[in-house]
Image: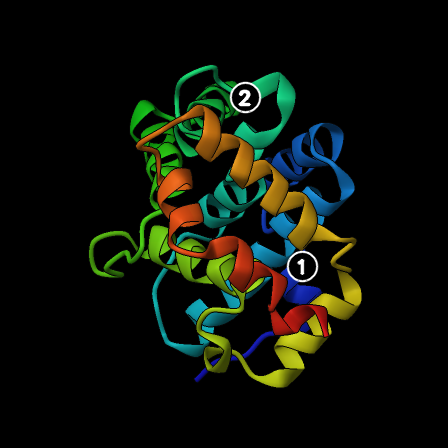
Amino acid sequence: MTTLSIDALLAPPTDIAERALDVARSMASPALLNHSVRSHAFAAALGHAEGIDFDPELLYVASMLHDIGLVPVFDSVSAPFEEAGGRVAWVFGAGAGWPTSRRERASEVIVRHMWSEVDPTFDAEGHLLERATSLDVSGSGWDAWTPDIRDGVVARVPRLGFAAEFTECIRDQARRKPGSQAERAVLGGLPERAARNRLDD
């Protein structure tokens, strides 16, 4: 089992990853930005702990942009926020000089982070991001991370009222986009689980 320091988990692995962080920093609210940074750290920590081979740059970029579709300027009238965010990532990848296949991978990872489960043999980055965001939003899978990782990441990247802000966003998405993953999440009790997330203790 390989573990990384909190500093290593928080550091963008490439110049392109650093640009994705700059996009998130410029466009997202402080709480949503910190959620994206924590999500990457939790995803990378899980990948190393469980020996899952993943693309560090792809995972970082997808983590930074996975909720960009919740930002008002990128919020689609009709498309689910994860699909809108995936398209933003596609455009980001084009600007970064990525081939079309890599742009599509970034989009897929972002869309799949809202799935209830992603097989790691099918999509390692999608699997890691889904599990990491589930931890950060609702505390799901708590024991997959050691206390030093959970506590260390939150200490370095504070929550800033994320649960309340995200719940408001996801309820709004559910109301405006019936049949979406957001609506299914709300109907499945996500707001209540987010309010009880032990990361806020």
Vertical side of 76 occupied by 22: above or below: below
Q: Can residue 158 be seen in this view?
A: yes
Closer to us: mark 1 or mark 2?
A: 2
> With 55 as the anchor, is 161 left or right in this view?
right
Vertical side of 50 occupied by 44: above or below: above
Mark 1 / mark 2, whichever is N-terminal:
1
Residue 48's quadrant in the figure? bottom left
**Residue 86, image x, y percentages:** 42, 30
Vertical side of 117 occupied by 168: above or below: above
**Residue 155, image x, y percentages:** 78, 69
Q: In which quarter of the image is the C terminus?
A: bottom right
Q: Mark 2 points at which residue?
A: 75
Residue 42's quadrant in the figure? bottom right
Q: Is residue 84 visible?
A: no
How many labels, in total? 2
Disc 2 is placed on an element classified as loop
Crowd around label 1: few <14 · some 14–19 · many ≥20 (10 Å): many
On residue 44, the disc is none
The three-letter amino acid code for the residue at tag 1 is Leu
> With 183 as the anchor, is 146 left or right in this view?
right
**Residue 169, image x, y percentages:** 59, 37
**Residue 36, image x, y percentages:** 61, 48
Vertical side of 170 occupied by 44: above or below: below
The three-letter amino acid code for the residue at tag 2 is Asp
Residue at horizontal 66%, vertical 83%?
148
Q: In which quarter of the image is the N terminus?
A: bottom left
Residue nearest the viewer, comparing 80 with 23: 80
Residue at horizontal 78%, vertical 65%?
156
Crowd around label 2: few <14 · some 14–19 · many ≥20 (10 Å): some
Q: Name the residue under label 1.
A: 10
Label 1 and label 2: CA atoms lie apart by 27 Å
> With 198 as the anchor, is 120 left or right in this view?
left
